[in-house]
Amino acid sequence: MPQVLKAPLVVEFPFTRSLGPVQSAFLTGLRERVVLGVRTADGRTLVPPVEYDPVTAEEIHHLVEVAPTGTVTTWAWNHEPRRGQPLGTPFAWVLVRLDGADTALLHALDAPGPDAVRTGMRVRVRWAPDRSGAITDIACFEPYDGPPGEPTGHDGHFADPVTGIVAAARLDYVYSPGRAQTAYIESLAERRTIGERCPSCRKVYVPPRGACPTCGLATSEQVEVGPRGTVTTYCIVNIKAKNLDIEVPYVYAHIALDGAGLALHGRIGGIPYDEVRMGLRVEPVWTEGGRHPDHYRPTGEPDADYETYKEML
């Protein structure tokens, strides 16, 4: 059996969001070493603050300051911190109900080991030396055995409030395409395209999935398809993608390769974008050393009849 492929994969993008008055005050307060909550109509103080009461759904905006000290309500030990987490050494994730609050705030607790952490222990905020108006302005919590902290009496109004944040969202993982798609990828390196046929409905799936999603049966019979095919549907791309060296406008299409029961997608080249059409017959164009077709171009054949590809739209 051929070795199944695997490779590291990173999905990363900057997530930008604007802040309403409540979240703006909370994050601006952290920048100024002030922890703010919001008080509900029945007198509960929620930290971190929210804009609507989770019980009544009423809008709430009465900001109140709470103390930078509090009590651990629950915790879990993190033996192996990951990239981007608050601390580089093992630490505890804790929910802390700050003095004056009725709800708990999630953050890291810097402790020498799990034996040093317990529900009910007292902690206080350790502020980051450089603060910009983000949850990371709280570097972490630390054990504390002194008296409760005293709020400064801040009313939640700031001269230079934070109005928006950018959070880097990133997911690192190892991706494996599995047996069926490994064979498909390796066939592309040989300038061939293979699918797998369902033993029941006889549909040929390209790329193969290892099972028929309609019949629920495993697929193992390999079938070479193409290389030519038919454009079933398409779109004209007018926005240039970052790090993609293709001039706009260009066409991206679903292409039903001859012998396949499912259309795959590919870029159409060798023809003006406004001449691409449903039914256009195309063939792959390979670049030197390429492991997959660079694009598809017209073959010069008459357009395919709609009846031959309507089931693959």
Image (spheres, grey):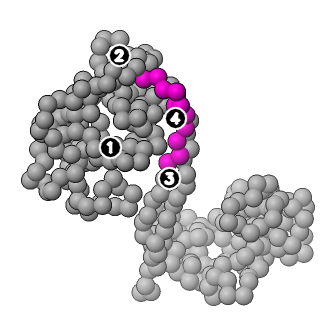
Side of 14 relative to 62 (left or right): right
The residue under label 1 is which amino acid type? Trp
Q: Nearer the viewer, residue 217 or 109?
A: 109
Identify the residue under disc 2: 40
Q: Which residue has dot 1 on it?
A: 127
- C-alpha gap between disc 4 and disc 2: 23 Å
Q: Secondary structure at mark 4?
A: loop
Highlighted range, magenta: 156-168
Q: Is residue 301 left or right of residue 77?
A: right
Q: CA distance from mark 3 to mark 2?
A: 32 Å
Residue 10: x and y in percent read: 49, 65
Mark pair 2, 1: CA separation: 27 Å
Q: Which residue is mark 4?
A: 162
- The kind of residue tagged 3 is Ala
Question: Neighbour class for label 2 at 10 Å: few (<14), some, many (≥20)?
Answer: many
The residue shown at (42%, 38%) is: 31
Q: Earlier in the sequence, mark 2 or mark 1?
A: 2
Residue found at x 52% / y 74% = 181
Q: Nearer the viewer, mark 4 or mark 1?
A: 1
Q: Is residue 5 left or right of residue 77?
A: right
Judged by depth in the image, the label closer to the viewer, 3 or 4, is: 4
Determine whether label 2 and label 1 are within 8 Å by CB: no
Asked which quadrant contains residue 301, the reply is: bottom right
Q: Mark 4 and 1 residues: CB-CB less than 8 Å, in contact? A: no
The residue that disc 3 covers is 168
**Where is residue 30 drawn, in percent x and y?**
39, 36
